[in-house]
Amino acid sequence: MAAADKLYPNCDASVWLRSCEQEVTEPLDGEITGELPEWLRGTLLRNGPGSLKVGDMRFKHLFDSSALLHRFAIHEGSVTYQCRFLQSSTYKRNQAAQRIVVSEFGTKAVPDPCHTIFDRVASVFKPDETISDNAMISLYPFGDEIYAFTEGPVIHRIDPVTLDTMERKNMMDSVALVNHTSHPHVMSNGDVYNVGMSVVKGRVKHVVVKFPFTEKGDMFARARVVGSLRPRWPLHPAYMHTFGITEKYFVIVEQPLAVSLYGALRSQVAGAPLADSLHWYPDQDCLETRMNEDVSIRFSVQYQSIPSFRARLLNHRLVAHGVARASDVYNVGMSVVKGRVKHVVVKFPFTEKGDMFARARVVGSLRPRWPLHPAYMHTFGITEKYFVIVEQPLAVSLYGALRSQVAGAPLADSLHWYPDQDTHIVLISRSTGKEERRYCTEPLFFLHIINAFERDGTLVLDLCAYKDAKAIDAMYVQAIETHIVLISRSTGKEERRYCTEPLFFLHIINAFERDGTLVLDLCAYKDAKAIDAMYVQAIENMQSNADYAEWFRGRPQRLELPLDATTPARVAARPLAALGCETPRIHYDAFNGRPYRYFYAISSDVDAEYPGAVIKVDTWTGATLTWSSADCYPSEPVFVPAPDAKSEDDGVLLSALVYGRDARRVALLVLCARSLRRRALAAFRTPSPAPKCLHGWFLRVKSNRPV
């Protein structure tokens, strides 16, 4: 594509699509420009996507790429570089087969001809052998050991010098975690906390796990649950990538991006991508605002040449509104006829004496378009010649209804709205009981038919219609939104709950208590399209996608939670800066969970003049500083404090750089954290393309020994 035709000419997204073809096992010496601080000694370890290729196949999502570990070692004014692939079980299986044999977040594995459907069902009871352990998100220390993380239950210990993969730890074995966040918190005393999902006494719960620091011994063997929270929707817990921690509280954000546990189970059996189990619930708010927006959208629709539609249904009961004709009563319900689910029209013939129910009979039937997902029906129409059945795209999962019954869950959990499906209007002949005509129209939701009649060769149908099914959500006392839950660090129980408008986030900047208020800062988006933006196809097509920049239009926001408010309390977010910020870091050792002033991030604005910018934000004043260079793309800026630092920003920022036009150039950038002026750059030539990394950790060396 010519530069003039690109919507985002300053952004080269190819840095995310590269595949490393050759590991760097022996350290490369960097070419240094500028001057490194004399006190800066240690190792910057990085983790991230390393290769989208497996044989002739390619992963579909950035989160699926094989994990590649990077190492920048700084010693006495010199810097070396290495990179190696994490030797996870998934990586080794894929490489041995030369194809993708383990499903990932967004990529379905190829069918294994040696595995039957019974093997796949049995895999549910052996998740350790079937769930991907490709830990390509982050790196964190547990004592003097370093582990690679993803959101699955398995983490990997790596050698911080050689980048060898040393050991595989399964959190299901130590604290029964089904999954956990990619960003645990490492406390100043060495204790580590993380949040995950577990089954406690038969119930799914979010749990906070503490791994107590020990200089000798196994921190995992001493792990214990120190807090728990039952999800608002037990079978649809919120997706969590990180959490917050303050002096008194664990801060859990339940965003309206939910994981269907049934969907995850189904994905495991079917070998489908885990992303298929994620559901975003957009544009939901409290009842008092939603009622005015949705319920007022009512209009009468006449169909002169009635078109057609798709849908799915809810229950086995008759619809709520029957129709009487000459004292006969008709109703529509759902039944099983000769082993098949059908919508049936039932007639209750009038009798002055006797039981009308005893004489009831089926006088018409219709097979749902989707037999296991029939349309939800609240009423139906009747004319002189026809029963009028409206199959709207609000469908009921029969399996979901059965599951809800077994689990004691709300039946509404089985309802699904399909906005891309048409509405079908079906005419069943009153004389034959069979479908005679079918029409379709745009998607709509309705509860009540006003009237239906025939006139001059036309059937007219009037109903009260909505553009979608949000009217049902509006009837909840409190509709879906983002919840922030405070779990007491002393009791381990939920203490306070707050709600705010729907938002999606991956990273919390910091959380702290001050003057009776808990402050929560995070990088927030208006919806979850940022995940869609990380599909490989979306990245490849971004230059012709006018909406792509909006998908990544995240902003740092602050939520102030009064600790004396009646719970649940409603709070509103305010922006901290007018720049897109991602992968935020702070002076972590001194200010995590405490009042702070500065954070550092990289730009998430693909339509900016310099999409690859390092950003510093002053949360007190809103002032910002940036560093950028043409065709240069930094990674997460890691703050390293100066010895005996005199201020919060007294130190340097370390960021791994890649370049757009030179795929085999990688560098370590050293910035003054106060001014964001460049202090030094160590550049390397790699034997194969260098992909952009995500997160990492700096291991400081206080002595003069080599690193």
Image (tube, rainbow, N blue to C red):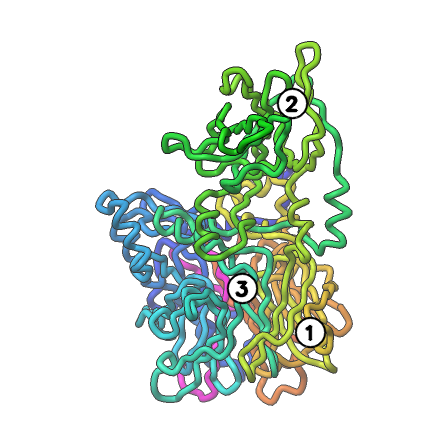
Q: Which mark is residue 326?
A: 2
Label 3 packing within 10 angstroms: few (<14), some (14-19), many (20+) = some
Q: Position of residue 62 (x, y in %)?
A: 47, 52
Which quadrant is the C terminus positioned in?
bottom left
Q: Which residues are magenta?
A: 679-707
Q: Along the horizontal axis of the image, is 82 left or right of 328?
A: left
Provide the secondary structure element on which disc 1 rests: strand
Question: Type of residue at label 1?
Answer: Val
Question: Type of residue at label 2?
Answer: Ala
| Residue underneath mark 1 | 519
Q: Position of residue 636 (x, y in %)?
A: 55, 65
| Residue underneath mark 3 | 231
Q: Residue at x 49, y 77 (%)?
A: 193
Q: Residue at x 61, y 30 (%)?
A: 380
Q: Is residue 687 magenta?
A: yes
Question: Type of residue at label 3?
Answer: Pro
Q: Earlier in the sequence, mark 1 or mark 3?
A: 3
Which quadrant is the N terminus positioned in?
top right
Q: Position of residue 656 (x, y in %)?
A: 51, 65
Q: Is residue 169 magenta?
A: no
Provide the secondary structure element on which disc 2 rests: loop
Q: Residue at x 50, y 29 (%)?
A: 359
When the figure is inspected, residue 250 is found, relative to residue 231, above or below; the finding is: below
Provide the secondary structure element on which disc 3 rests: loop
Residue furthest toward the top?
A: 456
Pick the front one: 430 or 534: 430
Q: Residue at x 58, y 43 (%)?
A: 542
Q: Earlier in the sequence, mark 3 or mark 2?
A: 3
Q: Along the horizontal axis of the image, is 436 left or right of 292?
A: left
Pick the front one: 449 or 230: 449
The residues tagged by marks 3 and 2 sit, at their Cα atoms, a distance apart of 52 Å
Would residue 610 be visible to someone looking at this image?
no
